[in-house]
Image (cartoon, helix red, strand yellow):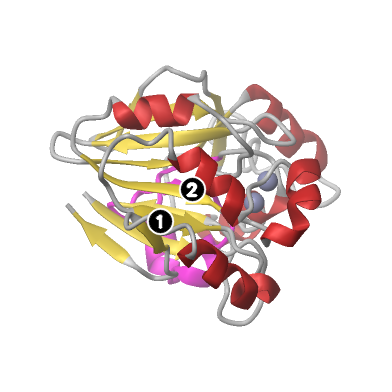
Amino acid sequence: MELRVLGCSGGEAEGSRLTGLLVNGTVAIDAGSLTQALTLAEQVKVRQIFISHSHLDHICTLPFFTKNIFGHTQVPVEIHALPETLDALRRHLFNDELWPDFSVIPSPDNPIIRFSEIEPGRTYEVEGLRVTPIPVNHLVPCVGYRVEDDHSAFIFSSDTAATDRVYEEANATANLRLFITEASFPNAQAWLADAAKHLTPEKLGEELRKLKVDVPVGIYHLTPGDREVMLPELSALGDPRLTLLEQDARFEW
Ligand SMILES: [Zn+2]
Ligand SMILES: [Zn+2]
């Protein structure tokens, strides 16, 4: 399996792209940076997109992506997400006001994108991968994902406050190579993390006690302007599994 980090920042600025992962060149997890990180030729190869939740930083390149692939694909790209997330995409984004409804263009029978509802806990087999949504604890309905093939697996928690299931799944996943989770705000902004259902480094430290396996933990979703404050706070946790997930990193297992 090849995992490519297209973006992993909790905010956008030059050099900091929003959340997006690409597996084997064809399956994307979240769409915060598809069009900034990938060439046009690479974008056309993306066949399946699993969305964690409706927040803009995880979906914002979907409109430009659909326009880019228009005329270059014979088969609709599948957009997998919770029913609540798909509802938000239909009502607020692909509504012909903010962007054309590419789920019926050029025709309802043969559109550019097709929305596909997912159910937490079910496993979806796509492009030789098994993708399992795992419910987490965020401001809106949100799932993390376990992605696996016959040799290796990784888990992406997406945005979440304190949660249990994703750790239980991680502890039970054979061949787990990487656990990706978030830290969004510095310790001094614990109130904001609580209100927005995110983690601070300190709260992350409590969460990681639930992770019983010795795998690298890649931290993502730092607020760019708070990086300098948060890096020492993350180091202070003293957890040797912790690493910072880096944009453009590639993992091969
Ligand atoms: Zn969010
Ligand atoms: Zn986010």
Q: Is residue 71 above or below residue 27?
A: below
Left or right, 220 with reference to 210: right
178 relative to 122, above or below: below
Note whether ligand 2 is within 8 Å of mark 2: no
Boundaries of the magenta span? 24-51
Q: Nearer the viewer, residue 172 or 47?
A: 172
Residue 130: x, y in percent? Answer: 30, 30
Q: Is residue 115 visible?
A: yes
Give the camera-side residue of 238 and 60.
Answer: 238
Of the two numbered discs 1 and 2 on the same chain, state the one appearing first in sequence.
Answer: 2
Identify the residue at horizontal 27%, vertical 47% (top origin).
Answer: 215
Q: Position of residue 38 (x, y in %)?
A: 44, 68
Residue that label 2 marks = 181
Q: Amino acid at mark 1?
A: Gly
Magenta highlight on residue 50: yes
Q: Regarding mark 2 in the picture, which secondary structure is present there? A: strand
Answer whether labels 1 and 2 touch (C-beta < 8 Å): yes
Q: Residue 251, percent across and down?
A: 26, 60
Residue 245 magenta? no
Return the x and y of residue 187 as percentages of the image width and height. Answer: 68, 58
Label for residue 192?
none
Relative depth, front residue between 24 and 144: 144
Give the alpha-carbon distance from disc 1 to disc 2, as whole Å: 6 Å
Residue of label 1: 218
Residue sitting at x 46%, y 66%: 235
> What residue do we see at 50% from left, 20% from top?
120
Q: Is residue 95 visible?
A: no
